[in-house]
Amino acid sequence: MPRVADHAERRLTIAAAFQKLVADEGLRRTSFVRVAAEAGVSVGLIQHYFANRDELLLFAYEEGLRSIAARVEARIQAGESAGRPISAILLSGLEELLPLDEQRSVEYRVQQSLRTEALSDDALAQVVRQAAAALHARVATAIGNGKECGEVEAAVDADRNAMMILATADGLAAALALPESPALPQVSAQSEVSARADLRADAVLRPVLDLVFTGRCRHFDR
């Protein structure tokens, strides 16, 4: 019996090839011909699933956002199950926005390329705005939850501080995306990936979170 084509899997394979090319060489040098070669499929197959490059671009961007959101949610669930403070869970989630390994580096480069494209593409700009609003809302909600449990003072402005936290994370991501940034402490090549995650997040993000999450969760006093 012939194998039934998994259309969702094919779309994801094509999107992954597109993302890799964008990350490695930039959006302007990406074409259906090059995506087909990278994915190991025909140009005709790509055209079967995506009418044009803009449609593929939008799908690839949204797929990257879904992947990040799923990992952040997994970190939240793990943190809640372990009874960790909200600030620690938020820090863990923010690490998924940083280019600390190959997958996250590809995602970051694709997002930056497509954010630039969104300046002149209304459909893409709408997706970018929605993604930014959703991320802002998630951080603001974490601050609001911190107020309820005692980690955050009641008078703290959740929206303003969410913006501060995300601006810091965005700046850190941009610095990390550049190889051997002199603005950041270096680590040995032997333990580069894990050390970068711990060192950069703790050295840059934790102090900012500590400005907002100044208290102790009352759940730990029960």
Image (tube, grey):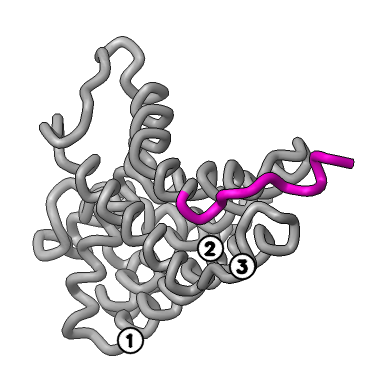
Residue 204 point in image, percent of width and height: 34, 41
Work out whether residue 56 or residue 221 is closer to the camera in this orientation and state it.
221
> In front: 71, or 85?
85
Q: Which secondary structure, mark 2?
A: helix
Q: Secondary structure at mark 1?
A: helix
Q: Report the disc number at residue 44.
A: none
Disc with the residue nearer the chain's start (1 vs 2):
1
Task: Specify the quadrant of the image occupied by residue 176.
Answer: top left
Q: Nearer the viewer, mark 1 or mark 2?
A: 2
- Vertical placement of 178 versus 132: above or below? above
Q: Secondary structure at mark 3?
A: helix
Q: Residues within 10 Å of mark 1 (few under 14, many from 20)?
A: few
Where residue 55 sits: x, y (%)?
A: 33, 77
Q: Are marks 1 and 3 in contact (CB under 8 Å)?
A: no
Work out which quarter of the rendered image holds the C terminus and state it: top right
Q: Residue 142, relative to residue 180: is it above or below? A: below
Q: Which residues are magenta?
A: 211-222
User: Badge 3 is on which residue?
Assistant: 141
Report the side of 17 relative to 89 (left or right).
left
Give the quadrant of residue 64: bottom left
Tags 3 and 2 in contact by the CB under 8 Å rule? yes
| Residue denoted by label 1 | 123
Where does label 2 land, which residue?
A: 139
Q: Residue at x 51, y 72 (%)?
A: 157
Q: CA distance from mark 3 to mark 2?
A: 5 Å
Q: For mark 2, does the 10 Å Cα neighbourhood hold few (<14), some (14 to 19), or many (20 or more) residues? A: many
Q: In the rendered image of this protein, does residue 193 appear above or below residue 21?
A: above
- Amino acid, disc 1: Ala
Residue type marked 3: Thr
Can residue 170 be seen in this snapshot? yes
